[in-house]
Image (cartoon, rainbow, N blue to C red):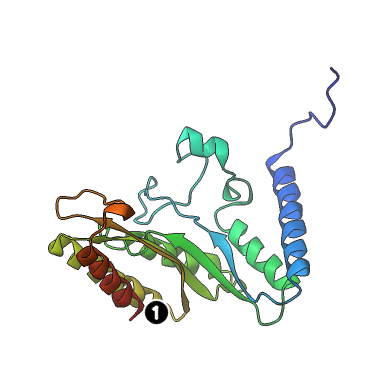
């Protein structure tokens, strides 16, 4: 069968130009469809990896070059084409261009409360926000945290989890930006380190989970 379409390889500049057009087309369409009724958006979602391959002390942005082969096949990484700084700056600029005057824009990620790296992902995200805003034009209004947490029946582990939840909120608040819990769900891990299925949770464990939910909200 005869193939159609452009088979001439695009230059990096041409790819960036085409993708910027696609991003604007999408953002403008979303803002038109929501007609000003939605004034709070996650403008960039899950941008960070959990690795510092370049050794600069903070986690790198996700890229087709630093994720699994499956992830690289199934996901698209804007920053690989628009640049680590410009992909966010462009998204923010286009959202403000086409959105309502009272628009609030958040960057959103998960594992910001993690204790195994002492909140390094959040510290890295804050540094990236500083970099994105260093042009003096880009303004990100807030940070969204996806809290996919677990309640641990081992009291020492649970205490560490709770300390780092507190540290997360303190670090977020210290930026002066808005703080938003964009997702909150909770698993359960027994005293031996085994995940507990919902059907097997005891009443005492339900109460422990309830207390952890209240702790996070308070």
Q: Quadrant of the C terminus?
A: bottom left
Front-most of residues 117 and 154: 154
Residue in the image at 47% along x and 52% along y: 61
Within 10 angstroms of label 1, few (less than 14), some, or many (20 or more) residues? some
Q: Position of residue 192 (x, y in %)?
A: 14, 50
199 relative to 146 in the view: left or right = left
Residue in the image at 73% along x and 70% along y: 34
Please tell me whether residue 140 is drawn above or below residue 80 in the rendered image.
Answer: below
Q: Position of residue 82 (x, y in %)?
A: 63, 51
Residue in the image at 68% along x and 42% along y: 12
Q: Position of residue 106 (x, y in %)?
A: 54, 70
Front-most of residues 37 and 6: 37
171 relative to 17 in the view: left or right = left
Q: Secondary structure at mark 1?
A: helix
Q: Quadrant of the N terminus?
A: top right
Q: Position of residue 29 (x, y in %)?
A: 77, 62
Q: Residue furthest top?
A: 1
Give the tally of numbered discs: 1
Residue in the image at 70% along x and 48% along y: 16
Please tell me whether residue 185 is drawn above or below residue 74 in the rendered image.
Answer: below
Residue 116 falls in image quadrant: bottom left
Front-most of residues 76 and 9: 76
Q: Where does label 1 land, which residue? A: 173
Residue 158 falls in image quadrant: bottom left
129 relative to 15 in the view: left or right = left
């Amino acid at each position: 069968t005869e193939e159609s379409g452009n088979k001439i390889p695009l230059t990096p500049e041409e790819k960036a130009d085409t993708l910027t057009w696609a991003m604007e087309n999408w953002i403008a369409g979303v803002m038109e469809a929501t007609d000003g009724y939605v004034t709070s958006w996650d403008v960039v979602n899950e941008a960070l990896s959990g690795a510092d391959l370049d050794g600069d002390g903070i986690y790198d942005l996700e890229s087709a070059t630093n994720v699994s082969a499956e992830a690289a096949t199934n996901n698209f990484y804007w920053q690989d084409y628009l640049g680590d700084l410009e992909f966010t700056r462009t998204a923010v600029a286009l959202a403000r261009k086409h959105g309502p005057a009272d628009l609030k824009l958040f960057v959103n990620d998960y594992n910001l409360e993690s204790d195994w790296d002492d909140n390094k992902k959040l510290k890295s995200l804050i540094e990236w926000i500083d970099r994105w805003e260093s042009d003096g034009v880009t303004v990100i209004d807030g940070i969204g945290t996806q809290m996919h947490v677990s309640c641990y029946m081992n009291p020492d582990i649970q205490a560490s989890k709770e300390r780092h939840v507190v540290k997360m909120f303190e670090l977020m608040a210290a930026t002066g930006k808005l703080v938003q819990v964009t997702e909150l769900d909770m698993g359960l891990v027994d005293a031996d380190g085994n995940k507990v299925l919902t059907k097997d949770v005891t009443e005492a464990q339900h109460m422990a989970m309830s207390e952890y939910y209240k702790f996070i909200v308070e």
